[in-house]
């Protein structure tokens, strides 16, 4: 029996739903933070200086609410409320302007154009027609 043919038992504790849920929660938190970063990148300048600095500390500098509260001499609840308010403000800008959504859509379109240009697959006239169609979509978005 070779080393590759051996099977090793997996302990039941490694297959628990709690572990899966904990890891899933971390992934969801990372997605939320990523979304917050993009919202801040696009709309952060529309916040007040105080809102920007606190929001940056939470989202970009990964500081805890307690750390920020101690540093600024305000309550932890005040920091929490400010961050939630900023989230709502930034989300409302995105609901109205859709800049982040358009950014991702255009990024996908550009990636598809690059893929078509580099791939060389298919009839060149078809590839050019597809590139022309996608570039037209991008220009409409602008």
Image (cartoon, helix red, strand yellow):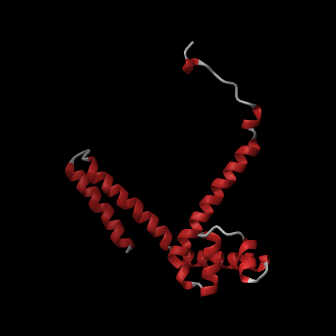
The foreground one among 100 and 140 is 100
Front residue of 47 and 130: 47
Q: Quadrant of residue 15?
A: top right
Quarter of the image with the N terminus is top right
Q: Is residue 10 above or below residue 82?
A: above
Q: State which quadrant residue 12 falls in.
A: top right
| Residue 76 visible here | yes
Answer left or right for 88 relative to 122: right
Residue found 35% across the figure and 55% down from its top: 112
Q: Split into 4 quadrants, where in the image is the C terminus? A: bottom left
Measuring 45% from the left and 69% from the top, which residue is drawn there? 102
Q: Is residue 10 left or right of residue 96?
A: right
Q: Nearer the viewer, residue 16 or 97?
A: 16
The residue depicted at 75 percent of the width and 78 percent of the height is 70
Find residue 27 and report its image quarter: bottom right
Residue 96 image offset from top left, x and y in percent: 54, 78
Where residue 48 sits in the image (x, y, percent)? Answer: 60, 87
What residue is at 31 percent from the left and 56 percent from the top? 114
Pinpoint residue 53: horizontal percent, then vertical percent: 61, 80
Furthest toward the front, the residue is 71
């Amino acid at each position: 029996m070779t080393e590759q043919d051996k099977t090793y038992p997996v302990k039941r504790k490694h297959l628990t739903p709690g572990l899966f849920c904990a890891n899933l929660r971390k992934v969801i938190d990372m997605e939320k933070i990523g979304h917050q970063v993009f919202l801040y990148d696009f709309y952060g300048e529309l916040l007040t200086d105080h809102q920007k600095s606190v929001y940056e500390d939470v989202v970009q500098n990964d500081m805890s609410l307690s750390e920020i509260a101690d540093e600024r001499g305000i309550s932890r609840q005040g920091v929490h409320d400010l961050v939630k308010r900023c989230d709502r403000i930034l989300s409302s800008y995105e609901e109205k302007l859709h800049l982040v959504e358009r950014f991702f859509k255009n990024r996908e379109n550009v990636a598809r154009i690059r893929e078509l240009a580099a791939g060389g697959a298919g009839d060149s006239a078809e590839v050019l027609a597809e590139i022309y169609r996608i570039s037209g979509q991008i220009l409409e978005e602008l």
